[in-house]
Amino acid sequence: MTAATIYHPRMISVAVSPYCELARWALDRLGIPYVEECHAPVFNVLATRRYGGGVVVPVLDTGETALLDARAVVDYYEARAPQKLKLYPADSAAETEARQLFNFLFDTFGVAVRAWAYAYMLPERSGTIRAWVNGAPWWERLAVPVIYPLLAAALRNNLHLQPDSIAQQQPIIESALSQIEARLADGRRFLMGDTLTAPDLAFAALSAPIMIPRQYGGPMPSLEQLPTAMRSAIESWRARPSGQFVLRLYENRPPRAPDLVALGKHGSGHTLKDKLLNFLIRPGILRPVFALLRRFSPILLLGKRAIVTRNADVIEVLKRDADFTIRQINAPKIDQIGGPFILGMDASPQYDRENATLHEAVRREDLESIRQFVAQTAGELVAAARPRRRIDVVNGFARVVATRLVASYFGMPGPNDPTMMRWMRDIFHYIFADLTNGQDVKQDALNSAVELHAHMDAQIALRKSQSSDGNDDVLGRLLALQDDEHPWLDDLAIRRNLAGVIVGAVDTTSKFVALAIDELLRRPEMLAGVRECALKGDIEGVRRYAWEAVRFNPHHPLQVRYCAQASQIAQGQPRSKKVPPDSLVYIATLSAMFDPDIFTKPGEFNPQRQTDYLHFGYGMHTCFGKAINGIQIPELLAALLRLLNLRRAPGSAGQILYDGPFPNRLVLEFDA
């Protein structure tokens, strides 16, 4: 069973339930893939109780918390949705009105519709059984026909059905439809005006049993399969303005986001080989191995491979970019994915030209506005987590902020957050973190690259069609540089350069934040110290603690370079070695940050070090986003550290869950 996360949750459902349909629609609209675990009524309780639920469905496990009904699902994701996808108006009075309407539809209208429909359908044994067992486990499919009378009796009792329930519920339904039609009478497109809101979703989903929309997300009988009296009532309601409104909403209902993991089309980093390698490169194993190498063989030659472990030698190799090159390491994959990018280029006129152009668009003077954006977005996500006092550091926080910075600052919003996150991770994994050369990793990256490039091409074309869009972002600046001084900067060049930058802008940040907070939580005294910095607004102090914390578990413990010609390292030193031609050189940055010649008392946690860390590389190919992450990561951590009594959630949720090399979940708790 795949572990649930906020952007890949598990839904416990009765597939036919309109309340489950409401939750499905809310997730589909945000592009969130999910696993739907379907059960027959009553049987669902066996599953929902695992999460603290009962008879009510849906129950949604987000990995961070369990949401025990559809209203909780809507509210939970509403608090975390980007502004353009919010389901409630920003105006407080309009929001209050929308919530009142939603609650009426949820608590009164939906209940009446469900009771009315079941009053007709429970006597229709075969049709009801088909709807109940849709997607259910095999043993439920066998049991339901046998014990159907007991299940039907339980449902009648739970829904308080009486012989006159149809007559009781029909006026409630009619009154609600009239209220909806009164709202629509002024020609508005949706219930609250010209924008889709939560009441629209609630009305459409909860009306489904009395409107029978073709696009319903669960099992639904056709009109021809319904009892005659029921069909007659439904046909009359479908013909009303409110019925036509529901059918129109369903015509534009977003499709379900494909769950690529469940389909077997996305399993990056989950092979036995991947898991074994990830185990072997844990810092608890690498640190003692590197300590031995630093002492006895600091430049270890193994045929056409060299491992460099001392700080001075690591710096030397990274500085000697003409002797120890990167093109042979990164360029084949970068070119395969989307064309040349500076992190796959050695020193050349093309590198100089494209690096300079990127720095014209990504400016140091932007750092303050980036800091403000990160602080505000982080604050919003922390506020969203406060009601439940639990926060997933990865998919509920750091990965989301980084993705939205790509949209806001770099000017490249995705179709939705989950899709953009998947594209960024798949491509980054293949180019920079695929140590096993897995075919599934490669295929995921190729698939995501095709989707990303089509999306970016459309965004570039859209921006060019807007003569003066007023967006001072990186994409806008690159488009403005398409002039006689930059004849090479066509749309393809913009796409490949911007893609190269943003691919490393999400999971690098998210992983660093997760590793930093994980290490700090292991050291209560240091956690208290960095929290004091956060409370004082000392962001530089937070950065010092974070950089020292991740030294103990670096997000990139090794870098690789290619040595074409025989090259001497540590010339004149007793440890000096000549690397043979056509060799791979493994540069142990983790080891370099534990070299006692530079990092005194390396086993001690010391946030006051004045030494250069190697988290973002060194020399010509230092991470392009180093300055941005120097702002973004401390701001993200500070937002978490200000929370009172921050601690791990109990059990496995409070430990880092990995997706290949990437943290995918780390749930923390805090006090109000």
Image (cartoon, rainbow, N blue to C red):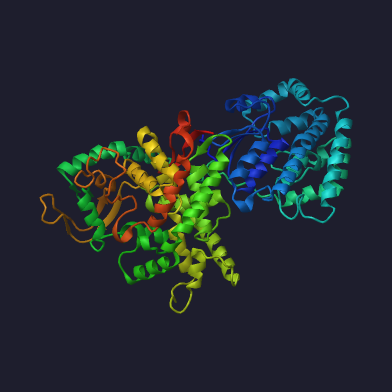
Residue drawn at point x = 51 percent, y = 38 percent? 391
Q: Position of residue 343 (x, y in %)?
A: 36, 60
Q: Quadrant of residue 624?
A: bottom left
Taking the image as drawn, is residue 61 in sight?
A: yes
Is 590 in front, or is 299?
590
Residue toward you, 21 or 450: 21
Q: Quadrant of the C terminus?
A: top right
> Where residue 637 appears, x then y in whole percent?
44, 44
Q: Does 472 sit above or below residue 31?
A: below
**In screen coordinates, is 225 left or right of 614?**
right
Considering every residue shown, the one lying at the far bottom of the view is 484
Q: Quadrant of residue 15?
A: top right
Residue at the location (44% across, 75% down)? 486
Decide if residue 51 is on the left or right side of residue 660: right
Q: Residue 354 falls in which quadrant of the image?
A: bottom left
User: In the image, is 141 to the left or to the right of 377?
Assistant: right
Query: Residue 411, image x and y in percent?
Result: 52, 61
Residue 215 in view, yes or no = no
x and y, in percent, of residue 13 in the image: 65, 33
Looking at the picture, does residue 509 appear above or below residue 496?
Answer: above
- How many discs appear? 0
Q: What residue occupies the far front of the structure in this picture?
A: 536
- Examine the rendered structure and indicate whether residue 60 appears above or below residue 304: above
